[in-house]
Amino acid sequence: MSYLIADPKNKNARPAPDYADYRDPTFRREFVADMERVSPFQRQHPNGVAVLRYDARQFDFCGLVGDTLAAAGMLDRVALAARGNRLEYLHELVAAENQAMDSSQQSAAAKALYEMPARFGALYERLLAEIVVPQLGVGPAHFQRTPTFRVFFPNAPGYPGETSYHSDIMIGHNPREVNVFVPLVRCEATRSLLFAELPESLELLREYDYDFARFGSDTQNDPVLMERCARMCQPLEVDVGDIVVFDSRCVHAGPANKTPLTRVTFDARVMPVADHATQHNVYQGRGRRRADFSIGAYFSARAVSDPGPTTGYAPANAAKTTPVLDADLEGVTAQPATLSSGVVDLIRRARPGDTVKIAQYGFSVGTVEMNEIVAAATRGVSFRVVLDKAGNSASAAALKAHAAAGLPIEVRLQKRTMHQKFGVVGDDAFFGSANFSNSASGKNSEDRFVVKNNAELSRELADEHDRLWAKSVPA
Ligand SMILES: [Fe+2]
C-alpha cells in the first residue's frame, strides 16, 4: 500500500456561502460547471456507476462487525458464526432494544460499530488502496476518514416510513466526490440503496436549476416528483464481495427496510487529489453539525495513491524473488526476480553433454546471459545459438572466440529477419519479448516467461530451433 502526503491546505479556498442553493455568482459559476461537466470518473463510466469486486475472505468486514458487536455485549459471536457470519440474520441475534432507531436514525447496534477496532480502519484503507482507488482510474484520492455504517433491522421501530430521495449535493456534498458503497449482506429490494444513474439524475437536477431547497421540499410533498424518483431509483442488487462506486451527483435513497432480513452496509466518499487541486469552492454539510467537507477534516489529509503498474519494472516488483540455482550448482537461493534470473537458473541446471538451443534477435556482449553460457560451456554444456544477421557481429565474434578456444558453442546467423527470443534446456524453456541485452534487462518494457517440466512445449520450440538452424549459416 502506498500513500501520497498531500498539502491539506487549498490555497485557493473560497468559503462556502451560507445558503442552500448557491446563489453567490462566483461560487455558483464553478458549482454549475462542476454539476454539468463530464467528471473524470464519468469519463470511464458514463452512467456514473461501476461495481467492483474484492475477495471477502481477505477483507473480512463481516467477521469484524460480528467481533465488534460481540465485544459490545450485543451479540453471541458463536451464534453468528453458526450462521456463516451472514449479517442478514443479525435481527435474530441482537436484542430488540439494540435494534430500535433513535432520533438520529441510528440503532445502538449501528453506533457500536463506530467503536470498531483499529484493524477495521486498516482493512478499510487497504480496500481503498488495493481495490477501489486503482480501479477508479482518477489517480490518488483523499478518503472519508470514518466511513458511515448503516444497520437497518427489518421493520425496526423508530425508522421513518417515507423514502427520501436526494442527491448528496443537496445536503452540502461536493459534486467532485465519488461515493463508495460496500454491502455486508445480500442487498435487494428495500434492503438496499435505491439508485438512479447519472444522466437521469442530472436531467432532473437541471430541471430544478439546482435549487435544492425547492427540490428537497418537492421530494417530500410533490407526488409527481416522488413518483418520478420512485421510477428512476432502482434497488442496487449486490452482495458481499461487491463494491458500488458512483458519482456523488446521482439521485438515491435509503429506504425503510421492509424485507425480512437485516441490511448492513458501510459507505464512504473519496475525493480525487487532482480534482481537489483545481477547485476553489469549499463545501459543508447542511445538517445541524454543518460538517466540514474539507481535506484534513471530513477527508483524510493523506491520499491513497493509485499503486500504478504491477508488472515489469514497477516498484511493486522490486522485492519479488525467484529461486535460482547457485553459481557453484550446490544450493538454491532466492534471487531478485529480474528478467534474467529465470534464464540464469535454466542454464545453470543444464548438465555436461546437454545441448542448449537458443534463438535471439539481439544478443549483447557482457550480459549476464553471455556470462552464464560461457560458464556452462566451460563445464561441458553444448550451445547452439541462432542470431539475427543484423547487429550481432560483436556477440557472434565473442562466442566464436570461445569456440576457437575449445568451448562447445556453435553460432549461426539467419539471413532473413529472425525476431525470435527463446531457448530450450531439456524439458524447460523460456520465451518472450526480451533479447539478451542490458536494455531489455534494465530499461525496456519486456517480458520473459520460463516454463519448466513441459516436454511438449520444449519439443515444439526445439523443432522450431532445428528449422531455423537448418536455414542459417555459420557466423
Ligand atoms: Fe445519500
Image (cartoon, rainbow, N blue to C red):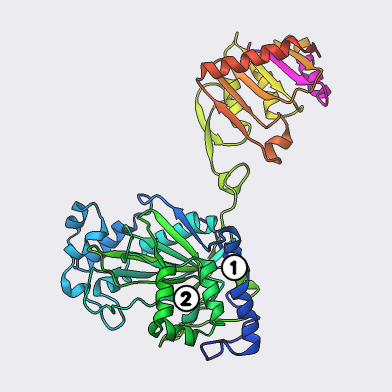
Q: In the image, residue 405 lies at what x, y percent? A: 76, 11
In this picture, which residue range is highlighted in magenta? 380-402
Q: Where is residue 304 in the image (x, y as percent from the top left)?
A: 53, 62
Q: Which of marks 2 and 1 is in front?
A: 2
Residue indicated by mark 2: 168
Q: Is residue 28 visible?
A: yes
Secondary element under disc 2, as helix, strand or loop, is helix
Q: Residue at x 62, y 41 (%)?
A: 312
* Location of residue 456 in the rendering, given as x and y in whole percent from the top left corner: 53, 16
Please state which amino acid type lies under the numbered disc 1.
Val
The yes-or-no answer for disc 2 within 8 Å of ligand 1 is yes
Please give the name of the residue rendered at 66% of the width and 86% of the height, measured from the top-left corner: 26
Nearer to us in this view, 169 or 474: 169
Q: Which residue is at the far front?
A: 224
Residue drawn at the location 79% of the way across and 23% of the way down? 417
User: In the rendered image, is residue 407 in sight?
Assistant: no
- Snapshot quadrant of residue 282: bottom right
Say which element carries label 1.
Answer: helix
Horizontal and vertical percent position of residue 288: 40, 88
Q: Nearer the viewer, residue 424 or 92?
A: 92
Give the residue pinned by disc 1: 273
